[in-house]
Amino acid sequence: MASNVFTGVVDLIPEPRHVTAYGANWFALGPGTGLAAGEGAERTERWLRATLGAATGLPLASKESSGDDVIRLSIHPMVTKDLGAEGYRLAVMPTGVHLVGGGPAGLFWGAQTLRQLLGPGAFRRAPISGSWRLPLIHVQDSPRFRWRGLMLDVARHFMPKEGVLRYLDLMAAHKLNVFHFHLTDDQGWRVEIKRYPKLTETGSWRARTKFGHRASPLWEEKPHGGHYTQDDIREIVAYAAERHISVVPEIDVPGHSQAAIAAYPELGNTDVIDTTALSVWDNWGISPNVLAPTDNTLRFYEGVFEELLGLFPADAAEFSAFFHIGGDECLKDQWKQSPTAQSRIKELGLADEDELQSWFIGHFAKWLSARGRRLIGWDEILEGGLPDGAAVSSWRGYEGGVAAARAGHDVVMCPEQQVYLDHRQAAGADEPVPIGYVRTLEDVYRFEPVPPELDEQQRGRILGAQANVWTEVMEDHARVDYQTFPRLAAFAEVAWSRLPAPGERDFAAFEHRMAAHYPRLDALGVAYRPPAGPRPWQRRPGVPGRPVDGPPPNK
Ligand code: ACM
């Protein structure tokens, strides 16, 4: 392992597979340091010049790869063979740097390591010092999981485009590569659909918002809203792809759809309630107002998806062929009461409302598959039968993921008991709007995505893991930062770094490396939760969370 001279400098997060440091010596970057980029290195070259160039004030001009004082970027089949397309080797020598990727993505992740080695100043947007040096070091690295995801709920509280681009940068800095973009819910529809303008005219804002969790008596008495234009989405997808991040959009159906029904009342169960009286929901929970299982609804959403497929090209990045259609928490009360839904159940020869939901999801699985796409949904899509080729986000625990893997489906592990970052991160009364379980930095660090009961082949179905950020009680980007960090750094290590020994992680060593990581987060302007607890302005005294009284739930 690294020698003490470099303490704080080679404290990398996520921890690489192998690090060898060569004594107290350095390679200094200066105005003459150049970049020599081979084929496939274009994105990393652009990123280094733009990001490290801004932080250091150095030109990092193009240079021949022979000579000294060069950062060489290349892709080599030996690295691909040994470490995979996302692996890399980084060698810092007195004369320059060799960064070799197994593929373009590996090279990019190697560049993230290089940035950490330069110190916290490398995370700023303008230089605050004139001295930039790298320790002489050799790193060999590759990820444990292919899918290293972050889900952001921009429906409950809208995050303007600038904030999303910032989160893509924060993900890249932690070697995370899937941005699950939760674009629609009962409380808001956040993406422009040209053929259905009311989705955003009506569906993207609400008149007021519950402040605190459901049982809170408080209201934020002002309109809340916002949406991404189609050009905003194109920009977000391209910005992500430049960083080897796949954007997986989620349009949640057939539940969590009240905002869409408020915009187009005919999408709801009009034979059960007066859907013209609905508005975008201003409270939290699970709305009973779900989509009607009619041909009209299917055609409407095919229209929505047709526009979205154009905005989220399948080849943008590794997992861009995936399209998330939700499927969670669809209350069936209205379908039980609806003559239209009941006659659909009869006509299709289905057993019950669960099978009706399965038919609904199956329709879109086939529709997406015919267009070269893959459906992914929350683990409720297992109920009533899972369509061929569909993948599952296992959120209610490990069980859904285990069942899906055993049935030969791909799985992303994101159990709410472990990696829902909306849940409080300490037991104290100072936590802002505390909800759900207490999940500390250490708890997240000890999350193990692969359930032990799976055999070798079934384990291969675990694509990876994802942390989910639901924003009911996060009204702005500082609140999102507070809930997300530092726990996302622990999650990044879970998703990227191998276990040092089976079933074990060394939290003390992680905490030691975190001491070097907080200054990087400070330089990036991340409003994380400090280890000692929230700063005064990070608290929300008097705003009730969940449960309102009594201790937080244990499991
Ligand atoms: C979920 O948390 N409803 C997926």
Image (tube, grey):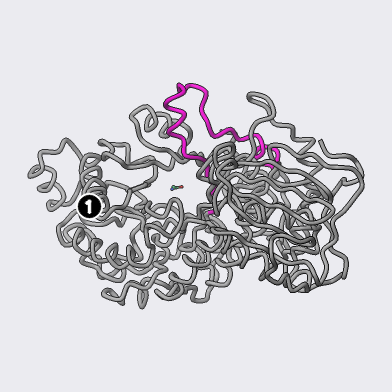
Q: Is residue 465 magenta?
A: yes
Q: Looking at this view, is 32 or 320 the one in front?
A: 32
User: Which residue is found at the position 28% from the left and 69% from the top?
Assistant: 277
In the figure, is residue 462 to the left or right of 292?
right
Q: Does the magenta stretch include residue 23?
A: no
* Quarter of image, res 189: bottom left
Residue under pointer 1? 370
As displayed, is residue 203 above or below residue 481?
Answer: below
In x, y percent, where is residue 319? 43, 51
Residue 431 seen from this side: no
Q: Looking at this view, is 353 or 66 the one in front?
A: 66
Task: Say few, some or many: other residues with alpha carbon within 10 Å of mark 1 (under 14 / 14 to 19 / 20 or more).
Answer: few
Residue 159 seen from this side: yes
User: Which residue is found at the position 20% from the left and 66% from the top?
Assistant: 266
* Quarter of image, res 274: bottom left
Mark 1 close to ligand 1, CB under 8 Å: no
Q: What residue type is labelled 1?
A: Ala
Stretch of the chain drawn in magenta? 440-469
In the figure, is residue 480 to the left or right of 539?
left
In which quadrant of the rendered image does the C terminus lie? top right
In which quadrant of the rendered image does the N terminus lie? top right
List the single residue furthest toward the front. Answer: 66
